[in-house]
Amino acid sequence: MIVRILGEGRYDVPEADMPAIEQLDAQLTDALDRNDETEFDSTLVDLVGQVRHSGTLLPADDLQTSGLVVPHPGSSLSELKELLAEES
Amino acid sequence: MSVMKRLSGIVQAKANKALDKAENPADMLDLSYEKQAENLQKVRRALADVATAKKRLELQATELQAQATKLQDQAKQALGQGQEDLARQALTRRAGLADQLADLGTQHAQVEAQQQQLETTATRLSTQIEAFRTKKETLKATYTASKAQASIGEAVSGISESMTDAGMTLNRAQDKISQMQARAGAIDELIDTGALPDALGGAKDDIQAQLDATSQAGQVDSEMAALKAQLGSAPAAGGALPSASEAAEGSATPDTSAPAGGAS
C-alpha cells in the first residue's frame, strides 16, 4: 500500500505492516472524535513514526498515487479539523 | 471513516479538480508541468518568508535577552544601594521578560520545523519537475495509442497528487508564517510603547533614573564632606555628614537628578 505523509512524500508499506498503521489510524480518528488533543498529538507522532519505519520512501519522480494519507507531522487537532472541513 | 481515508479523499478530490481544466492528455501534461513549476516558485517564496520570520524572532530574542541582563545588573546595583523595592521592581520586570523569551523560543522551534518541511517540499518538487519534463515529452509522443493514454492518466494523477500535497503544505506554512508575523508584530509594539523597555537604550528607563539619582546623592554627600574637610570643619563632619546625607536623599534627590541627567 502506498501511504503519503503530507509535506513529506509517499512510502511503500508492505501489506504485513498495514494492520499496525490501521490500528493507529483508528486511534487517531477516535482522538479526533473525542477532541482529545493529548491523545491526538502522541498518536500522530506514533503514526508518522510507524509509516516511516515500515515503509520505503518512494523517489520524487515515481508517479504512483497513494491510497492513504497521513496528516502533516506536528499538525494540531484543530488544524486537521479545518482540513477535513474541506470535504464536500 | 478513518482520518487517513478521509484525507486521501480530500487529496484526490483536489488533485482531480486541478486537472479538470485540461481538455486532452497532452494538455494535462503541459498543465501539470506548469502547475508544478508555479508551486515550486511559491514554495521558494515561502522559504524566504520563513527565513525572514526566523531572523526577526532571533533579533527580538537578542533584544529581550539584553534587557533581561540589564535588569539583573540594575537589581544588583539597587541592592548595593540598599533600595530593596527598586531591586524587586527590576527582578519582577525581568521575570516578565523571561516569559516572553520562552514564548519566542517556542515560536523559533516552530519556524524551524516549517523551514525544514518546506525545504523537503522544494527539493522533492524540483526533482519531480526535472523527471517529469523528460517523461512528458515521451508520453506526448505516444499518447495516441490507447495503452499510452492510460499511462498518461496514471502519470498525471500521480503528479497532480504530489502537487496537491505541495499546495497543502504551502498553505499550512503560510498560515504559520502569518501567525508568527502577527506575534512578532505584537512584541515589536510592546517594545515600541515602552511596555518592554528598549534594551538598546532608546526608551526611558525609570529604574536606571532612580539608581542614578541615588548614586548622585551619594556623590554629593562625599563632595560635601570633602569641602567641609577643606574648610577645616572636619571635627564637626562626624555630626554634620548624616544630616547632609538625609537632605540629599530626601528633598534634594528629585530636583538634582533631572537637570543633571539632562545635561550629561
Image (cartoon, rainbow, N blue to C red):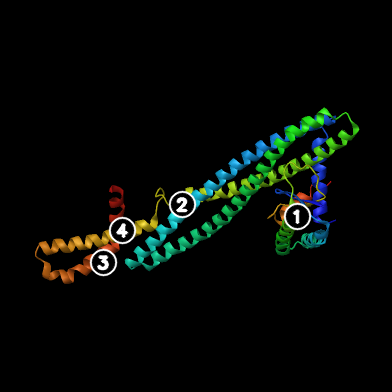
Closest to the camera, between mark 4 and mark 1, is 1
The reply to whether label 3 and label 4 mark residues of one chain is yes
- Which of the 4 image quadrants contains residue B89? bottom left
Q: Which of the numbered marks, if any, corresponds to residue B213?
A: 4
| Identity, as a three-letter code, of the amino acid under mark 3 | Glu
Chain at tag 3: B
Residue at the image position 81 percent from the left and 40 percent from the top: B157
Spatial CA span between label 3 and label 4: 14 Å
The reply to whether label 4 and label 1 mark residues of one chain is no
User: Is A76 placed left or right of B246 in the picture?
Assistant: right
Q: Is residue B115 visible?
A: yes
Chain at tag 2: B
| Identity, as a three-letter code, of the amino acid under mark 1 | Gly
Other-residue count near label 1 (Cα within 10 Å), few / some / many at <14 / 14–19 / ≥20: some
> Of marks 3 and 4, which one's residue comes earlier in the chain?
4
Closest to the camera, between mark 2 and mark 1, is 1
SS at mark 1? Answer: loop
Q: Residue B131: x and y, percent? A: 72, 37
Residue at the image position 18 percent from the left and 61 percent from the top: B224
Chain at tag 1: A
Spatial CA span between label 1 and label 3: 80 Å
Residue at the image position 86 percent from the left and 34 percent from the top: B148
